[in-house]
Amino acid sequence: MEPPSSAEMRAFAYRLLGRREYSVHELDRRIRQKWPEAEGVGELVAALEAENLVCDQRFAESFVRSRIQRHQGPLKIRAELRARGVSDSLIERELGGYAEQWTSLAREWLQRQIELPAEFDQKKKYYRRLQSRGFTHDQAMDALG
């Protein structure tokens, strides 16, 4: 298989970016996944970043909003953003804007799932479920009442 031209790689990147936002790291990985032997991928991604077509801040904003709509907590969102190559400072800035909402988000998710349990065993079960969704100990305990 012959290496792709820069126009082919750019067209592929445009198709990806036309569907959703990507982090710089994620876009680089996707292009290299399609063409492992390709040269100039880093330069292409840097050019797309310079043209403001790929932006970690825009990606992080969009990602955090979508995960909050799915009722996911800050721990899970933070881990997923790190896995996608977003810097810790950017992650903290984006999550910090929602600091006051995490407990109410946990409560909202619980109310959609159950009637608030009175029994200890049920509380333990829902505590574990909240933690698996990325909420902290304090947020889970506040939500359980």
Image (cartoon, grey):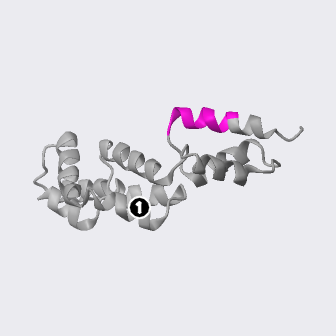
Residue 143 placement: quadrant: bottom left
The answer to whether 118 appears left or right of 42 in the picture is left
The three-letter code of the residue at mark 1 reads: Ile
Residue farthest right in this picture: 2
Residue 87 on the magenta segment: no
Viewer-proximal residue among 110 and 84 = 84
Question: Any magenta on residue 19?
Answer: yes
Quadrant that contains the C terminus: bottom left
Q: Is residue 10 above or below residue 23?
A: above
In what quadrant of the picture does the N terminus appear? top right
- Is the stretch drawn in magenta largely helix, strand or loop? helix
Residue visible at 34% across and 46% down in the picture: 65
Q: Which residue is mark 1?
A: 91
Percent x, y for residue 102? Answer: 23, 56
Residue that appears at 65% across and 49% down: 47
Provide residue 57's location: percent of width, then percent of height: 45, 53
Q: Position of residue 99 (x, y in %)?
A: 24, 61
x and y, in percent, of residue 121 in the image: 20, 58
Seen at 45% across and 66% down, the residue is: 88
Q: Which residues are magenta?
A: 11-20
